[in-house]
Image (cartoon, rainbow, N blue to C red):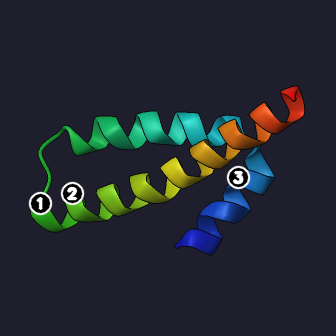
Amino acid sequence: MYVKTMQKVIEKGDDFVDSEIDRLEKLRSGKLSDKKKEQLSDRLNILSTFSVAKLQAKKKVEL
């Protein structure tokens, strides 16, 4: 799943991460099975890794 997400970030750009996080959080707040909520949480954790990496890269550029 990590590689698939990385490919989408490369294809769609940095904005993909933020929009996908928003989309998944909306889905997770709905009525879902426990298994599906767990899957969405896993995906959100992966996306948050990309989000943190993006912020760190931005800080390095500013220095």
Q: Which residue is the site of mark 3? A: 9
Residue contact at pointers 1 and 3, CB within 8 angstroms: no
Residue type at mark 3?
Val
| Mark 1 secondary-structure assignment | loop
Residue type at mark 1?
Ser
Residue 11: x %, y % from top left: 79, 53
Q: Dot 1, crowdedness within 10 Å: few (<14), some or many (≥20)? A: few
Q: For the point 52% across and 73% down, which residue is it?
A: 1
**Label 1 – label 3 distance at C-alpha:** 27 Å
Q: Which residue is the site of mark 2? A: 37
Front position among marks 1 and 2: 2
Q: Dot 3, crowdedness within 10 Å: few (<14), some or many (≥20)? A: some
Q: Nearer the viewer, residue 5 or 58?
A: 58
Residue contact at pointers 1 and 2, CB within 8 angstroms: yes
Query: Residue at the front extreme?
Result: 63
**Label 3 – label 2 distance at C-alpha:** 22 Å
Q: For the point 51% across and 42% down, which residue is it?
A: 20
Q: Which residue is the site of mark 1? A: 33
**From what the image shows, is residue 32 above or below residue 54?**
below
Q: Quadrant of the C terminus?
A: top right
Residue 29: x %, y % from top left: 20, 38
Q: Dot 2, crowdedness within 10 Å: few (<14), some or many (≥20)? A: some
Residue type at mark 2?
Lys
